[in-house]
Image: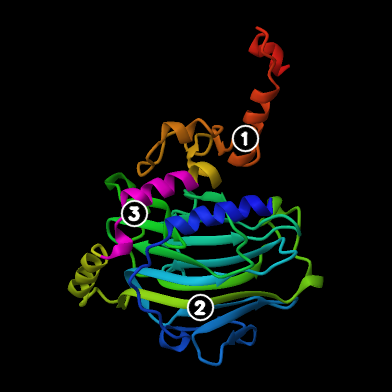
Amino acid sequence: MALGLFFAFCWFIGLAAATFNVTTISFDEGYTPLFSPGNLVRSPDGHSVRLLLDVYTGSGFISSRMYHHGFFSAKIKLPSDYTAGIVVAFYTSNGDVFEKSHDELDIEFLGNIEGKPWRFQTNLYGNGSTNRGREERYNFWFDPSKEFHTYSILWTSKNIIFYVDEVPIREVVRHDKMGGDYPSKPMSLYATIWDASSWATNGGKHKVNYEYAPFTSEFKDLVLDGCPTDPIRSFSNSTACAETDAWLQTRDYAVITPKGRSAMRRIRQRYMYYSYCYDTVRYPVTPPECVIDANEKQRFRNSGRLRFGGSHRKQMRNARRKRRSRPTSNISTEQNDM
């Protein structure tokens, strides 16, 4: 398995040769502690921060301003060993201001039992549409606890892109029929670590084991590109934010090249194990922003989960093993599958 991760990582590094033209900032230039400041540890130079989860509490930080569209990024290193029940989140939200109509863009990292890998999910809400979650879940193609990796969210008036190591893994293009479900109000950037024992690992089967505490997540190379604004006023600075939104759409991270689209397609085929777009149990009518890929769709049940369980890599290995073991005599497929 380690060798497989090594080759997957080498392949991925080849895709991520380009580097986005962004400017990093120190923690104090753009952020403030959110809760439990005793569990937030700044580096001596102020350019990185550690969030701790112990038996008493987790921790988090929040951007000092709210932003009306932007590009938000950080290099993150996750806790290692036994991490079941833990969630580390990097996300934008305005839930503190618009409690009943909040918007949100999520990257959530889901811990696991020792020996099992971290997983992660992306999600978005608009105008309080929490009953219409748009989750997609993925296996990692590397160990996110060994080294820092870059996770980014682009949010403009036209589209949303989630990136891992500057390679796109998901794009949501705004569709008129989404209406208020597309995030449109100013949001803050958050990072948190917390105990989600009730749901994070195998539906809550495995809880946080505090014998392994404290659990540490590390953040550095923080990026806030966007239009800082006051969400309450009726935007005296709306023109400035429109200009910033137009500027964002010209940036290198706003354009997915043909090579980037090919990389995104391969990642989704190999590592995505749930998509709401294929979950016809939850959504008998496909949400308007979903772009259905016929090859992708055939891998999923109507629950949005992979057919036959496991990962795409396991499915491909099983298919190859089955072909090798199939006798050359003219025996029906039904008999071979029995």
Instruction: Give x and y (percent) for residue 65.
Output: 38, 80
Q: Which residue is mark 2?
A: 220
Residue 253 forms part of the magenta stretch: yes
Relative horizontal placement of residue 284, taking residue 199 as reference (left or right): left
Q: Which residue is mark 3?
A: 180
Q: Which residue is mark 1?
A: 315
Q: Nearer the viewer, residue 200 or 25?
A: 25
Identify the residue shown where x is 64% and y is 39%: 314
Q: Is residue 63 above or below residue 159?
A: below
**From this viewpoint, which residue is outermost toward the top?**
330
**Magenta portion: prevailing SS class:** helix
Q: Is residue 162 above or below residue 288?
A: below
Relative horizontal placement of residue 114, taking residue 39 as reference (left or right): right
Residue 135 forms part of the magenta stretch: no
Q: Contact, CB < 8 Å: mark 3 with mark 2? A: no
- Report the mark closest to the observer, 1 or 3: 1
Which span is picked out in magenta? 251-267
> Sequence-wise, which precedes: disc 3 or disc 2?
3
Circle 2: residue type: Lys
> Sequence-wise, which precedes: disc 1 or disc 2?
2
> Sequence-wise, which precedes: disc 1 or disc 3?
3
Q: Dot 3 surroundings within 10 Å: few (below 14), some, or many (20 or more)? A: some
Q: Is residue 270 above or below residue 125?
A: above
Circle 3: residue type: Gly
Instruction: Give x and y (percent) for residue 271.
Output: 55, 47
Question: Is any atom of residue 136 visible in this view?
Answer: yes
Q: CA distance from mark 1 to mark 3?
A: 38 Å
Q: CA distance from mark 3 to mark 2?
A: 33 Å
- Report the mark closest to the observer, 3 or 2: 2
Q: Is residue 243 above or below residue 173?
A: below
Circle 1: residue type: Gln
